Amino acid sequence: MSFNPLQERGMPLEKQFRNWRDLNVTPYDKDSVHPFGRCRGIVANGIEVEAQMFSHMLARNTLDPEIKRHLALVRRVEAQQQKAVNWLIPGDETTLEVTLGYEQVAVDLTAWVAQNEPDAYLRQVYEFGLLEDFDHLYRYANLYELLDSKKAEKIVGGLTEITPGRPTIFEHRDPRDEIRRPMTALAADPQSILNALTVMSAEQQTMNWYNTIGNRFVEPLARGLYLEIAQIEEQHVSHYESILDPGCTMLENLAFHEYNECWIYYSFMEEETDPRVKALYELHLAMEIEHLRIACELVRKVERRDPEEFLPKAIERPMQFKENKEYVRQVLANQVELTSKESEFVPVSTLPEDDRYFAYNRTVNGDWVPSEAVIAETIEGRGDEYRLETEGPNPVPGLRRKDERQSAQTDYATRIAAE
C-alpha cells in the first residue's frame, strides 16, 4: 500500500510546539527494548539533526528574510522533534551500549538500503560502506567485553552477527579516494534519493556522536578506538554525501529533506511495536507533512517550479529493520578485499606499490592501531576474542578464529604488511 505525503493533511505549524514536560519523554527500558526499536530511534535522531543542520546552512546562504523566517519556524519544531526521539535513550544505557546500537543501525540500515537500491553503482557504494561498519560493530563489542565484562549479544538481540568485516586497519584511505559519482536527481529512481539522504544522515550522526563522546573515556585504548573509528565515519559521510546530486537547488534539497523525513516516520510508525513510541512517530509524521507542504510552497513561490515534478509520487517501500545475516555474509565473502580508487572500487591487489592508499595507510596507522589492539587485549585479558557467529564461522577464511584457519592474515593484510 503506497502513501503520498503530498496528498495528506498535516498538523498546522502553530500547533506543533510542545512544552518541556511533553518533550522530556519517558525513555525506553534498556533491558526490554527491542534492538530494532533502539535502531529506529537512532535513525530518527540522525535525520532530525541533518534537517536542522541543512536548514541552518540554507539560512546562511539566502538574503531573503521571509525564507529565513519560514526556516526558523520549522527548524525550531525540528529541534523539538530531535530532543523527543533522542531523549528516548535512557541515562543508564552506557556510552558503549549506545555505540553498539549505532553500529547495529549502520549494518542493518545499510544492508536494507543496498538490497532496495535500484541503481547498481549506488548499491555498490552501500555494500562497500556496509563491510566497514560491520567491522566496527565487532571492534566495539570486544571493547565492551574487555571494559565491562558484558556481551554485546544482549544489545543486538542476536539479530545481527558480530564477526570481523573489512578490517578497520585497512579502511583508512587517501581522502581523494572517497568521492563517488553523483546521481542526477531528475533521472534517478526516487528510492535512490531517499536511500542516500537516510544513510548519509545516519552516518553523519554516528560521526557526530563519536566526535563528542569519544574523549569521555579514561582508558587510552577506548579513547583510541573511538578516535580511529570517528575518522572512518568522517570518510563515510564524504562517501555518501558525494552521491547526492550537486545540481539540486537549496530549496529543492529542502523539499527532498522534508519528504525523506515523512518516509522515515511513516516507515517507523508502521514497524514500531511500542505503542508509546509509535504514537510519537505518528505525531512527528503529521508535523513533517506540514513541513513538506511549506517547503513545496517555497519552491513554487521562489523558483516558480512545481515540486511534484521532482519529488517521489508516493512512498512505495517503507524502510524496515530486519535480519540481514545471509546477505551481509555474501557481501563480505565477495568484497572484503575491495578498496576505492577515486570513484571506483577495486581489489587492493591491483594497486601499484606507490599508490597513495599505502602511503596514507602507513601514516595514520603508525606503530599503534587501536582497532587491532582492542582485539589483542581482549584475547590477552579474556582468553579469547568476542564474536557472535550464529550462522557459522566467518565466510572469509582469513578472518576466522586462529583455531579455524591456518594463517592469521588475509591476503589483504599480507599485501599491506609487505608495503
Image (tube, grey):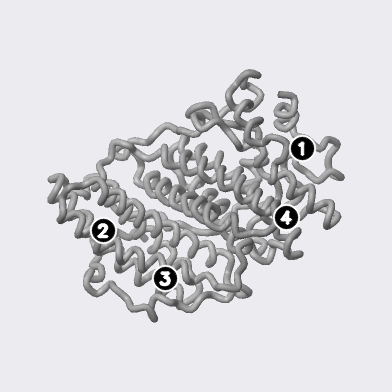
Relative height, residue 268 to residue 25 (above, below):
above
Q: Which residue is mark 4?
A: 142
Disc on the earlier residue, 2 or 3? 3
Relative height, residue 412 to residue 250 (above, below):
above
What's the mark number on residue 84?
Answer: 3
What's the mark number on residue 324?
Answer: none
Q: Horizontal placement of 398 versus 237: left or right?
A: right
Q: Which residue is mark 2?
A: 292
Is residue 148 among the parts visible in the rendering? yes
Under mark 1, the amino acid is Gly
Q: Which residue is mark 1?
A: 398
Badge 1, how many Cα within 10 Å: few under 14, some, many 20+? Answer: some
Which dot, 4 or 1, sits closer to the camera? 4
Distance of label 4 from label 1 (alpha carbons): 19 Å
Q: Nearer the viewer, residue 72 or 194?
A: 72
Under mark 4, the amino acid is Asn
Q: Horizontal placement of 309 versus 211: left or right?
A: left
Under mark 2, the amino acid is Leu
Q: Residue at x 45, y 77 (%)?
A: 25
